[in-house]
Amino acid sequence: MSDMSFARLADLGEQLEHTTKRHEIVNLLAQFLQDLVPEEIAPAVRLTIGQVIPEWDERALNVSWAAVMAVLDQLTSAAPDLREQLSAQAVDGGEFVRLLLEQARSESPNPPPLTILEVFRTLQEISETSGAGSRTRKAALLQTLFQRATPVEAKYLAKVIFQEMRHGVNEGLMLEGIAQAAGVRSALVRRANQLWGDLGEVAFVALTQGKDGLEKGSVRLFRPLKPMLAQTAEDLDEAFEHFDGSLALEYKLDGARVQIHRRGDQVRIYSRSLTDVTDSLPDVVAEVQGSQGAAECILEGEAIAVDGHGRPLPFQHLMRRFRRKHDVMVSADETPVQLHLFDALYVDGRPLIDAPYQERWSALEKGAGSLNLVRRLVPRTLEEGNAFAEEAFLAGHEGVMIKDLGSTYTPGVRGQSWLKLKHVMSLDLVIVAADWGYGRRHGWLSNYHLAVLDEETGDYLAVGKTFKGLTDEEFQAMTARLLTLEFSRGRGTVLVLPQTVVEVLFNEVQASSQYKSGFALRFARIARLRDDKASSDADTLQTLRRLYERQFQHKGQLTQSNGS
């Protein structure tokens, strides 16, 4: 067994934090990967990006900030004023852990030094620990790690646990590092990651089997693919021009995206975050089993909650179904779910992600059997398209999806081949902090700091605050939720780990010098909690910038003059 120290990975993180040039980051990653022996490759890659468990894996660490602090309390002795001072200095939870251990540790780290494999396997053991006594067992496992960690190693342990690396290495950069280390084309590595959804496996195959191993990769049943993502469109005129009239429109349903894998009567259903939600949707499973469609398939669609007349219910009703673990049949009777399919990724032995959208739709029509397909139109004119969009609105749906008829399916990519046109402007944002309320909202965290994801750095950048949109019951629930994610506080504000995604409605994007992002949302209000989305699925600074620029295709813009 190799004994590459965890300190090497922590040192890599420190170097990456102070490196801004893309090619230098890729070089650092490639050099690090080339020094690993085969059994270390997948664990080291996953730890570097803060993703111990692949997205499609049902396991989760489920370690709270309070649990980590309870372990650190046993290793340190710090007065409250020192903790407050260190918290104010720290930019995130990992940095706070480093400062705390540097200045208040009771004793030196226990030998022997941590290794990459030990850290990875211990964290995996934590993810597999459940049932009676699991909290105590997890605490003991955490303690074995932090007792042996140096302050810098502890910083990266915390960052991995809370998936908050903040060193600028996103998935794209890691893929480039893997390609450089293995001496293969970046496109080949990206393709394998789209199919497998596991950077660790991609790195292992690339570095041990090279080009031949990667080229053997294909779609796998019961291994969910990352969903293809859409950009935002302002109006249908823009879309018709963008696609030169070669497009299809689909109802954009206010539900949860699902990916269905089937082999005969064996059916598994995955959410957009690749979580297995099969057990929560027995009615949908039964519908697929009885559909007489393709014997083997991977189909994609939207699940929506409906009332007794088949009309769509608000999104939160569906989320209750997804979270339900007990009495699921009772829940199915109370809140029926309708499935509407819109894509086919694999049918009876044939992978389809490289086929054009129009061809995938034809395969879907044949492979879906009796299952519902989403309402769809290939409009001949803009007027016909606008009438279809109005029908979607009158039927109670969010808007329409606009798809290039010739586009291939690109898992996990937010490209220009799919556009979404909603009746109001909205973005999925991450809560990074919250202010204590006053008056009627006293005692609640009720003014939420909203942030977009900067794809280039991996940071979450604030674009405004809002206390609008939630009920009193939701304020209370959100307060309890955010306090479990707290890593610092001061002057009435609680800083939280960026793990809570909310859909935010707004009227306009404004330039703003108040925020590092450079933008602020006008009249922002929370529409709903998006538990079906991970923080990495949040809308990006780059998307927000495009929305801002598009506004001036339809309205005037003041220009700055000298001396103004």
Image: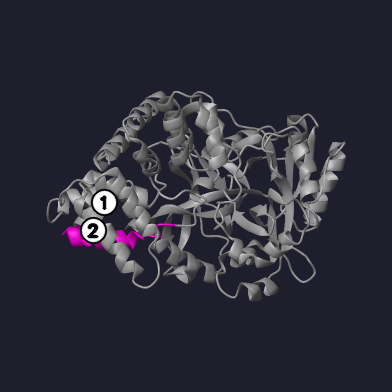
Residue 30 percent across, percent down from the top left: 38, 28
Label 2 crowd bin: few (<14), some (14–19), many (20+), radius 10 Å: many
Q: What's the colour scheme?
A: one colour
- From this view, report whether residue 142 is shown above or below residue 225: below
Q: Which amino acid, mark 1? A: Val
Which residue lies at the image location 76% right of the left edge and 62% below the top edge?
290
Callout 2: helix, strand or loop? helix
* Residue 62 inside the magenta-drawn segment: yes
Q: In the shown orientation, is residue 349 left or right of residue 94?
A: right
Image: magenta residue range: 60-81
The residue beneath circle 2 is 72
Give the quarter of the figure containing the N terminus: top left
Q: Earlier in the sequence, mark 2 or mark 1?
A: 2
Residue on which disc 1 sits: 97
Q: Nearer the viewer, residue 546 or 342?
A: 342
- The numbered disc on residue 339 is none
From the top left corner, tell me how far across and down residue 25 is, in percent.
38, 29
